[in-house]
Amino acid sequence: MLSLSLLLFLFKLAVDLLMYLFTENDSFVSISLRIIISISVITPLAFYFFRNFFNKLNNAAEIGFNAFNEEIKSINFLLLFVILGKLLIPNSLEFHGRINNILGLLYVNIYAIICLVAGFKLLHFLFKWLWIKRHKKTKSQLMLIRLAIYFFLIAEMPLIYFNRTLTDFTSNPIISIPIAFIHIFLFVTMFLSASKNNWIALLNKREKFLLILQSIIILTLTIIIDTFMWELNGEGKFYYGLGLFYGSSTILTLPVVLSAGYIIRIMFSAIVSLPTTEIVGKKSNELKLLTYLNKIISQSIDFNKLIDTATSIAYESINASGAWTELYNDNNEINIISDQNINKEYLETLHKNPVFTEIFKEIDDFLLIESVIDSQEENKIIGLIDFASALIAIPLNDGNKRIGTLVVTNVDEYGFDTEDLNIIQAIGNNVNIALENAKLITESLEKEQYKKEMMIAHSITEKLIPINLCCIDYYDIASYILPAEEVGGDYYDLVTLRDGKNCLLIGDISGKGMSAAFYMALLKGVVISTVNTVDSPKDLLVKINQALYSNMDKQMYLTLSAIKIEDNEGNITFSRAGHLPMILKSGLDTKLYTPKGIGIGLAKTEFFEKHLEEISIKLDYEDYCLLFTDGVSDALDGDSEDSDYEKMKHILTNSVYNNTSELVNIMEYSLKNSKKFKNQRDDMTLLAIRYNKLGVI
Amino acid sequence: MTQENKFVINQRHLEKVECLYLKGYLDAHTSPILESALETLVKDGKNNILVNFRDLDYISSAGLGVFMAFIEDVREAGGDIKLTDMQQKVFSVFDLLGFPMLFDIEKEEKTAIDKFNSNEERVSD
């Protein structure tokens, strides 16, 4: 576009030259030809400046203050050129390019091009910044301005044809008054359009001064150029000169008028916002710092880093002369962990005085001492801190626990105000929230870890406990286990002893979760390796205790009962290592069997063996044996004062069932309807045996 | 209910015996309180320990384990942990596990204190 413009410009020069040499300059044909060629030069130039106008304004670098400033600067230079260039227009110039030499003709053409570029640049500048800071009326206002430009361009044509003298043009009120009115109207439009000027308030002092200075320059320059247009005295060479290049005077002077309205508004805003610069700057600085703090808080659960950041932000954001954070621990020690421009050792020395320490420790909400000298007697001790004439201190809390104090000091008395206090409190609140967050994060991580462990523990125990006990001739056996969410450590098994006879085991490992699962695996291994070496329940329990006693934590133990099926006649042997009793239901009677025995893992082999009883029981036809763990007895009989398992006995004697499966189902039903079932915290395990003489269930 | 008021230990210092009075529920969640109380006593060389169960309403397997953790060390140091004043329900838990064979469980606090005193004399003789 630019090269096309240049090409056409050269063409125009050639035509002007030819006309100068061979024709009269003011003939109708020559004026028309000049207008047509001028338009053909201006059009690509306009395209060059306004191509993709609305799409180009997305780049942040192009819409910041620096861009604004740079643009004004370059426009100022161009306008200065225009003003200086005017001085060199040949004095002998007459209207319609009646010029007395070829050099003058060339100069006027080049000058017109400079004016055009300056005009377009100014127009683009105005459009661009109005559009960036646009409001709902901007679009229509810009349209109005565009129409005004077209109007003036068209109006220029008859002026060139008919108002041949400058005097006619400027002194004829029919022409000059409407033009003046339109100019005033556009000026006002521009003034109104530039209403969205909040951005100026946010500039810093230097930027505002720069803006005002640039505005004064551009305003001065535009007023000078405007006066050229209305110049009645002198030669009127400016208008004559531009008259040689149709359109150039409109393109330059109209934006000059428009920019005056815009710039006055901008300058006005900048001047008005000057006094608030400092407070706005401070506010935006605070905002930045708090945003930064928030970021740190959300990213970091590193306690020391958090305190460090908070202290330095407090120090920087309110222009303090010193800051530190002191932390308190359970042993009444004081740790000064983040010191900004404060002598840490000296501060520690001061803390040796309990009066000094108490001042900070006693703070409930905040402490604001505006002037140490004027403050209450008890706070005068603060004056011992290096260069501290004013002070703000706020407490830091981890949940409900007071963990420390954030302190900022100022060299000047009354150097802090309530605004500063608000900021420090905001920082303190952020720290407290961060600590709370960190705690929650840690807790949820632990919870997650715990859940995973529980899943592993569950899968281990599931594999260790048989799902179905296989049948034994003449005996009907059923089992039931309801694992708690927390693995409870209940265990049961059916094993074959050395003599080939069956032995039932039921047990409960103290502790829960992963450790219970671990000991269950250990127990299972010991059981597998010992069953082939013993013939009696007692020996089995002794062997298991022997293997486990030295391998268990001192406070871990397990209870285990073993029932051996001796023959087809209903003879069983029963031994109990600390486990709950066995209930025998015979006819309408129930009986508890609690042979002596210590829990496994509680005593050394000899002692354990010495105190372990083994009893023989003869079952009658249809007798039921019920074994269980404390999950069951707690749920059913836990509330009663005496622990004689009355509820369980009641179920055994007052329910109707024909085999162990039915008994277990009834028990399950009772368990699930018990009060304690809802928050079941322990495994529930049942083992039922019925002697069945017929050998068939 | 918080853990703190679910289980409470009151301590009484006698001439030769340290008495712990347990109150409330002693389970997996509250047993660390008892554990640290016993640990402090043992650390301070106070090995004659009497634990009074009068106001203890419930004890779980984890609670029982705590006593096992300390008894060996205490006895090696020439002291003992004696348990007294158990409610029937609590006693039967101890009983089932065979604790009466492992620990000196007395009905009354006085008997236990007397035993401690006579034992001290015997040792000092």
Image (tube, rainbow, N blue to C red):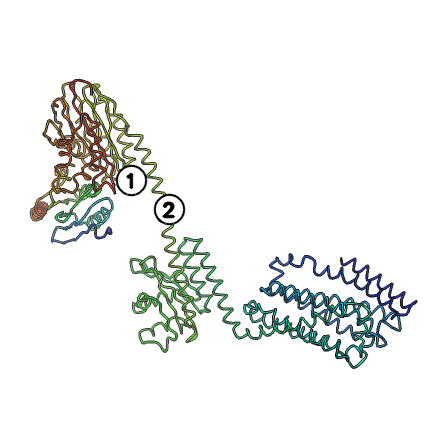
Which of the two discs, 2 and 1, labels the residue nearer the N terminus?
A: 2
Q: Position of residue A338 (x, y in %)?
A: 41, 61
The chain that hosts pointer 2 is: A
Question: Which quarter of the rendering shows the N terminus of chain A?
Answer: bottom right
Q: Residues within 10 Å of mark 1 (few under 14, many from 20)?
A: many
Query: In this figure, which residue is indicated by the disc labeled 1?
Result: A486
From this view, report whether residue A90 is shown above or below residue A621.
Answer: below
Q: Are marks 2 and 1 on the same chain?
A: yes
Classify residue B70 as left or right of residue A525.
left
From this viewpoint, which residue is outermost toward the bottom? A233
Amino acid at pointer 1:
Glu
Between marks 2 and 1 in the image, the one whose residue lies nearer the viewer: 1
Query: In this figure, which residue is indicated by the disc labeled 2?
Result: A445
From this view, report whether residue A95 is shown above or below residue A658.
Answer: below
The residue lying at 84 percent from left, 66 percent from top is: A32
Who is closer to the viewer here, A541 or A245?
A245
